[in-house]
């Protein structure tokens, strides 16, 4: 697919055309861990799915920190593309690639060494500690492939190509399902087999992206001479990428701390929370994709100095998020028991009951992340990364505090209430900041 310029033409069409492949791509990416959970839970039992569930929030801290760096760098890439400064665009791509590889290796080694201490710190039960540690270590060894895929896909999206990463994710997701069945069911590797399948699938998606860019996208393909580490751009990239990475890490570090509120409730609650966390991912990810489409749209138009299209894009993006929630809430509410049965074996009826209570509340609460992600998309695209970090920090802090307050008396239903409180606080900060910024830009 050729590059996609969003600085002119129909705004709604641009956002929909860009967001839909991102939504589908992110949903396919989520199938990696969802398939792990379904196959592990139904084939190996409640303890096995609890082991994967205890490891996932920690795994996501590392993965989404790296993804945040790529996301921050892609804002700069989009701005340079919108300004048609292609030489600077290539230098930004090269700088992010080289610096990111070195940093990912460092994170991999550090996380690998601290796996068991971290699992103990969040209160993982002893009966699933070894299984969780084995799963997590294998995933961490494949972290470099996660970085490369995130880097290549964000680079393509910065120039408006969200369809190609989707194609490669479909291929790798189908491969992941086949390898899960092979390693867990037939070979008998258990929980570690699910992790191996995920790593191999991630490697395939990153390699396919590299081959495609090398052969088909000369605009972002780098020759050996163009592989340089630009110190000036590195500083700017760190300023953008670090804040976005901290924001993403804050989200999933919050999940680890919320998990520590769930773990004392027992294995059934851990299994239920692991399942509903998967549902949360599938429900909220399309909203995040709409927000990411808005980020690229705003960044390109900011680079082109096209202020009039920015306000219109914000209204269209919020409308898309609200429409998505309206379509989502009905199946989540009325299909909650069936959804839980996908993740939990027949013997886990208590886990199903707990998960249904959670989903019945969240079906109504999901409108909040739809709105927060749209506002976040605006601030990211305009380069106001500090606002996105502060608002995320407020949301996560409130969620963690109220999870620990409500979980002992209300179980994981209290976790849902804590999410709502966090999202409300986030919007209470973001909306005045948005209105102030728009007034300032109009005055200028």
Image (cartoon, rainbow, N blue to C red):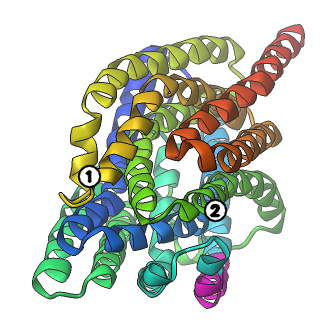
Q: Is residue 105 magenta?
A: yes
Q: Which residue is mark 1?
A: 349
Is residue 352 shown to the viewer in this render? yes
Read off the magenta span: 102-117
In primary-sequence order, the first of circles 1 and 2 is 2
Is residue 161 shown to the viewer in this render? no
Q: Which residue is mark 2?
A: 65
Q: Where's residue 9, x and y in %? A: 47, 16
Nearer the camera: disc 1 or disc 2: 1
Residue depicted at x 14% and y 88%? 187
**254 versus 113 height, above or below:** above
Q: Where's residue 385, x and y in %? A: 77, 42
Type of secondary structure dominating the magenta stretch: helix
Q: Is residue 50 magenta?
A: no
Q: Where's residue 207, x and y in %? A: 35, 72
Left or right: 270 as drawn, with respect to 298? left
Residue depicted at x 60% and y 11%? 312
Residue depicted at x 57% and y 40%? 414
Q: Secondary structure at mark 2?
A: helix
In-front residue for pair 334/185: 334
Q: Residues within 10 Å of mark 2 (few under 14, many from 20)?
A: many
Q: Quadrant of the C terminus?
A: top right
């Amino acid at each position: 697919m050729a590059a996609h310029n969003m600085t002119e033409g129909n705004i709604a069409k641009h956002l929909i055309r860009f967001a839909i492949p991102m939504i589908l791509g992110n949903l396919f990416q989520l199938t990696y861990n969802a398939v792990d959970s379904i196959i592990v839970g139904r084939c190996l039992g409640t303890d096995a799915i609890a082991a994967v569930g205890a490891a996932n929030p920690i795994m996501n801290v590392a993965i989404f920190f790296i993804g945040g760096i790529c996301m921050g760098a892609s804002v700069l890439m989009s701005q340079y593309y919108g300004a048609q400064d292609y030489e600077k665009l290539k230098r930004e791509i090269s700088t992010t690639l080289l610096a990111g590889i070195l940093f990912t290796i460092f994170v991999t080694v550090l996380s690998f060494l601290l796996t068991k201490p971290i699992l103990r710190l969040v209160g993982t039960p002893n009966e699933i500690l070894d299984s969780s540690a084995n799963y997590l270590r294998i995933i961490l060894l494949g972290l470099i492939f996660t970085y490369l895929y995130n880097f290549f896909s964000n680079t393509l999206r910065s120039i408006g190509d969200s369809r190609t990463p989707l194609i490669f994710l479909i291929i790798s997701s189908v491969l992941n399902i086949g390898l899960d069945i092979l390693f867990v069911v037939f070979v008998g590797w258990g929980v570690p087999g699910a992790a191996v399948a995920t790593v191999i699938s991630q490697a395939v998606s990153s390699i396919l992206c590299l081959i495609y860019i090398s052969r088909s996208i000369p605009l972002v393909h780098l020759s050996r001479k163009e592989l340089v580490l630009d110190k000036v751009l590195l500083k700017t990239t760190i300023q953008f990428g670090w804040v976005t990475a901290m924001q993403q890490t804050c989200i999933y570090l919050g999940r680890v701390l919320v998990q520590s509120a769930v773990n004392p409730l027992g294995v059934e609650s851990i299994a239920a929370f692991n399942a509903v966390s998967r549902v949360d991912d599938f429900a909220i990810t399309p909203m995040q994709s709409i927000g990411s489409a808005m980020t690229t749209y705003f960044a390109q138009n900011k680079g082109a100095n096209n202020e009039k299209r920015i306000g219109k894009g914000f209204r269209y993006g919020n409308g898309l998020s609200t429409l998505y929630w309206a379509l989502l809430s009905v199946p989540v509410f009325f299909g909650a028991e069936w959804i839980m049965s996908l993740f939990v074996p027949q013997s886990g009826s208590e886990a199903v009951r707990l998960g249904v209570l959670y989903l019945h509340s969240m079906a109504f609460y999901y409108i909040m992340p739809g709105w927060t992600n749209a506002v976040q998309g605006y601030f990211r695209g305009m380069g106001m990364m500090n606002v996105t970090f502060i608002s995320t920090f407020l949301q996560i802090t409130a969620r963690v505090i109220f999870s620990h307050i409500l979980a002992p008396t209300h179980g994981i239903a209290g976790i849902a209430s804590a999410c709502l409180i966090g999202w409300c606080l986030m919007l209470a900060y973001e909306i005045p900041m948005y209105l102030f910024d728009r007034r300032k830009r109009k005055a200028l």
